[in-house]
Amino acid sequence: MPIPMTTYNSSPLGGRIRVPGDKSISHRALIVGALACGQSEIEGLLQSEDVLATAAALEALGVSIERGEAVWRVHGRGVGGLSQPSIPIDFGNSGTAARLMMGAIAGHDMSVSLIGDESLSRRPMGRVLTPLKEMGVEVAERDKSTLPLTLKGSSELIPIEYHTPVASAQVKSAVLLAGIHAAGETSVIERQGTRDHTERMLRHFGGTVDERNVEGGRRITVRGDAELEGARVLVPGDPSSAAFLVAAALVVPGSEVTIEGVLANPTRTGFYVTLKEMGADVAFLNPRDQGGEPVADIRVRAGVLKGVTVPPSRAPSMIDEYPMLAGVAAFADGETRMEGVGELRVKESDRLAAILVGLAACGVEARAEGDTLIVNGGGRVPGAGQVATELDHRIAMAFLIVGLASEQPVSVDDATMIGTSFPEFAGLLASLGGKLSRAVGEL
């Protein structure tokens, strides 16, 4: 049943908080831990619906996982050690889980049926299936590129060199995860750099990964027949989740918030770079290394923002943050242009369309010109609208943040899907002083 939610114009926000573990790293820690030999310990794992879907998929494939409050233990089966599941694997709403697991399953001589919810079943899988087919994976449903699908893997995968046609960390990761099963070296060449958590995670578990600049982009090569060893992973805070709370502190006058222990990987900080260009008072403090990933505390203070042009080259480093950036841009002075955001059309919803509809409901002028999103900020947002979330968690959270500083309340038709990535959202926002219509923890 849908759970509507409303936010109201709030007094200054303040406090020090931590956000849950990074979703991308949580997925990869579970998957690589399952393909390693021996036990791995994961501390700070994000226990959202998406990550739990990955854990359940691995358990269906024969992996033993001990779920603790603070620490999860994964008893790895080694590369090529997954077993035939007895039922179809349900990935719920998680495209990351489905696409990465395709790569992990690819190196096994077995057939696996993959299913998902209505939203996931509309999302494209062809971009992952294309390189996996080159490596020897078969798809039972010929010419089909959406779930449900049945994959037949191979214990004799062919190593390939694959040029990614679009910037996608999920495609790259699926190929690299399949590549550790193949004999020889498998390479991915990407024209635009994307998040590199899979490369870092494979190295952390003892895999051999080479990265170098080449003509036309960057080549990432993984050595096959890998022997990974169990490891300890401390998952840093998710910068995509932190983005909503950072935005809240920016747009609610008089606010100052510090978010501790957030992932500061440069392939994930495009949103924060853009905010600084807009004049935001955002500082990365106490930088440090945590399990092979850079981490910092983010301090943000409210202030006056101006519109900017965001280049298309920045999209891979902030693709999940555009809904929230559009909300921030509504409060900035002048026009903000977000170029090269066509990928938003194939996320959990058509996010480009959902952003435009949501902004219109809040009284904000915006338009799309091809793959460019343009928001006309005026420093004030009327609000008073109800936003259709289209079952998209990031659309829901972005417009709830808008409601904290708009003149009238903003409602979303359904906040249920927030649990797929950030179940603590409502509670943390309330702890900072945000005014919400529902009790903490009701999501």
Image (cartoon, helix red, strand yellow):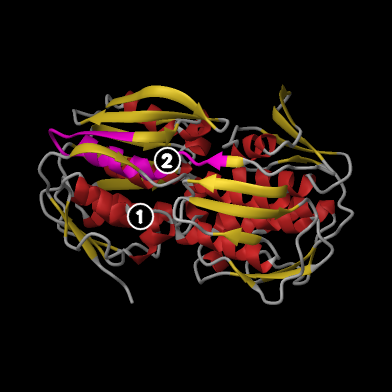
What amino acid does circle 1 point to? Ile
Q: CA distance from mark 2 to mark 1?
A: 20 Å
Find numbered disc 2 in the image and state the secondary structure of the residue it sits on: loop
| Quarter of the rendering containing residue 192 | top right
- Is residue 211 depicted above or below 106 in this figure? above
The residue carrying mark 1 is 395
Give the side of residue 246 with respect to residue 80, left or right. Answer: left
The residue carrying mark 2 is 237
Q: Quadrant of the N terminus?
A: bottom left
On whether residue 241 falls in the magenta region, the answer is yes
The percent coordinates of residue 239 (x first, y second) are 42, 39
On whether residue 284 falls in the magenta region, the answer is no
Q: Which label lies toward us, 2 or 1?
A: 2
Q: Residue at x 31, y 67 (%)?
A: 414
Read off the magenta span: 233-259
Q: Residue at x 53, y 38 (%)?
A: 316
Find numbered disc 1 in the image and state the secondary structure of the residue it sits on: helix
What amino acid does circle 2 point to? Gly
Q: Residue at x 56, y 58 (%)?
A: 95
- Sequence-wise, the earlier of marks 2 and 1 is 2
- Is residue 335 depicted above or below 393 in this figure? above
Q: Quadrant of the C terminus?
A: bottom left
| Quarter of the rendering containing residue 257 | top left
Mark 2 surroundings within 10 Å by alpha-carbon count, few (fewer than 14), some (14 through 19), many (20 or more): many
The percent coordinates of residue 340 (x first, y second) are 49, 39
